[in-house]
Image (cartoon, rainbow, N blue to C red):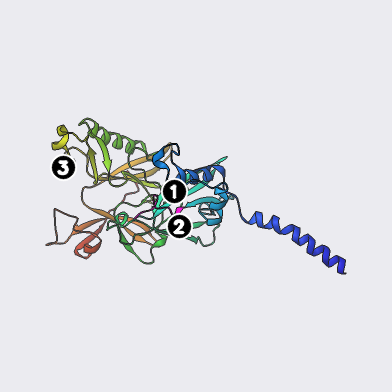
Amino acid sequence: MKRLRQALIFALFLAIPFVASAARPQPPKVVADAAMKMYFDYDYADPDNAWAPRPRSDQTAYFVKKQVLRPVYLSGNAEPDWMIDVEADPQGALCGTGGCPLQIWVKEGDGYTLVMDKQVREWKLHAVQNEKRQWLWVDLHGTACGSFGADECPFAFEWSPDGYLMPSARYAKAPLVHIAALPQAMDNYLSDAPDPPAPLAVLIATTSEACKSRGGELASEQALANRTPDLNGDGIGDWSFDNDNSYCAFPDTEDFVARRAEDPCGYLDCRTVLFVSIKAANGTKWRQQDIGKNQYAYRVDPVAGFTPVHLIPLAGHEDSNSEPCGVSTLQFCRIEPIVVSPNF
């Protein structure tokens, strides 16, 4: 009996390393390399970079131990997704008032694809009820909510059937209003939007050309092309073209001083356009719904999701020099739903 007990203990001892290794997946090389580049992207041959941190011989293992590299389960795939969380081992050169970089990589085919690359101040993972996946709560820079940098800006993302991290209304504990375009998991500022609908791509190109023809380049303080959740109930995610903060960046020469002082809306198409998908027998078609140059927002409901709305200043609260319907002045505004038609 004693020998049997010893044999069982010995067998259990042999099994422990196997169980431990199975419980901690190892990051794929492309993700580990991305983390290394994020932290150690320096030209070490340059004497000016003598101060720069250098990787340890076991840097990937160190990242795993510190949970800079960690498995997450946002997509619901059989294999884990991977997160690079710089906040877990912060570096001053990478972090600021908007927080630290956060990346999410998802398995697609034989490799991994970057689906989120964003500065966040705080994040939390939550389980999706009755599903083998999670959703991600984040706190962003205040400007992402139409406010000031230090202000809180809670938001959320979850996996879309279309294969990307889409804005999610799960963070709203009660109905609220999100002022500004919906934050994106990937900040695609200009022509870098992934596979925009053809009419949206044309509008981006036309806007860019308006600057090039004047000797400048299109610039913006926010993403120009933004993906939205399904707004018209056809099961396909939609898009918005948010051009109200765009301008032309001109070379720093005397010849362009006057042009830099011009109102960019004199030659740029400073408006917001929704691109709403329509299922058709021969594929997806896109309808443009112009919602104008006036300020807009989204009503966020934990059940109904996102609804675009107009923000209309009440009498006596109009102000042409600023946004009269900001976060702190919303009580002086009327909120009108923007009706998104499901048809052409």
* Residue at 45% over, 39% down: 44
Confirm or deny contact between disc 1 and disc 2 (CB under 8 A): yes
Is 93 inside the magenta-drawn segment? yes
Residue hosting label 3: 263
Residue type (three-letter) at the residue carrying disc 2 = Leu
Is 176 inside the magenta-drawn segment? no
Residue hosting label 1: 116
Residue hosting label 2: 136
Residue 81 lies left or right of residue 294; in this view the side is: right
Q: How many marks?
A: 3
Residue type (three-letter) at the residue carrying disc 1 = Met
What is the x, y in percent for residue 125? 48, 60
Viewer-nearest residue: 331 or 70: 70
In the rendered view, tell whether residue 276 sits above or below residue 335: above
Residue type (three-letter) at the residue carrying disc 3 = Asp
Q: Residues within 10 Å of mark 2 (few under 14, many from 20)?
A: many
Q: What residue range appears in magenta? A: 86-96
* Residue at 25% over, 61% down: 327
Q: Residues within 10 Å of mark 1 (few under 14, many from 20)?
A: many
Q: Identify the secondary structure beneath mark 1.
A: strand
* Quadrant (top left/top right/bottom left/bottom right) for the C terminus: top left
Could you tell me what secondary structure mostly forms the magenta stretch? loop
In the rendered view, tell whether residue 250 sits above or below residue 80: above
Q: Identify the secondary structure beneath mark 2.
A: strand
* Residue at 65% over, 54% down: 22
